[in-house]
Amino acid sequence: MVILITLLVVGWVAVSTIGSLAYFMGEQSKPIHERNWRSESFAKLAKAITGKEINYSDRTPAYRMDAYASSNLAQ
């Protein structure tokens, strides 16, 4: 029984680690919403998990005009 519980715990840790790496590596390369463009908390967390800095030259804005962007237009 102890071996089964140990295997479940080790498997859960492995899956959560691989999932976190995949999520943050994918998020670092896909288009990003303007309001999250310079999110320091995401950048720190992604750097801690993946060990890589975010390359902002690879990132593009996800939406050119939406409710968030239109509320920031000059009046």
Image (tube, grey):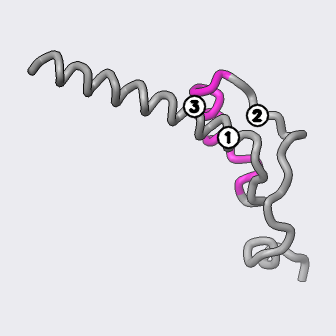
**First-in-chain label (2 vs 1):** 1
**In which quadrant is the N terminus drawn?**
top left
| Vertical arrangement, residue 68 with respect to residue 50, above or below | below
The tag on residue 73 is none
For disc 3, the marked residue is: 21
Mark 3 residue crowding within 10 angstroms, few (<14) / some (14–19) / many (20+): some
The tag on residue 54 is 2
Please tell me in which quadrant of the rendered image residue 23 appears.
top right
Stretch in magenta: 36-51
**Mark 2 or mark 3, which is nearer to you?**
3
For disc 1, the marked residue is: 26
| Vertical arrangement, residue 65 with respect to residue 56, above or below | below
Q: Disc 2 vs disc 3: Cβ atoms closer than 8 Å?
A: no
Residue at the limit of the structure toward the top, as seen here: 3
Q: Amino acid at mark 1?
A: Gly
Relative horizontal placement of residue 21, taking residue 67 as reference (left or right): left
Q: Residue at image x 65%, y 21%?
A: 51
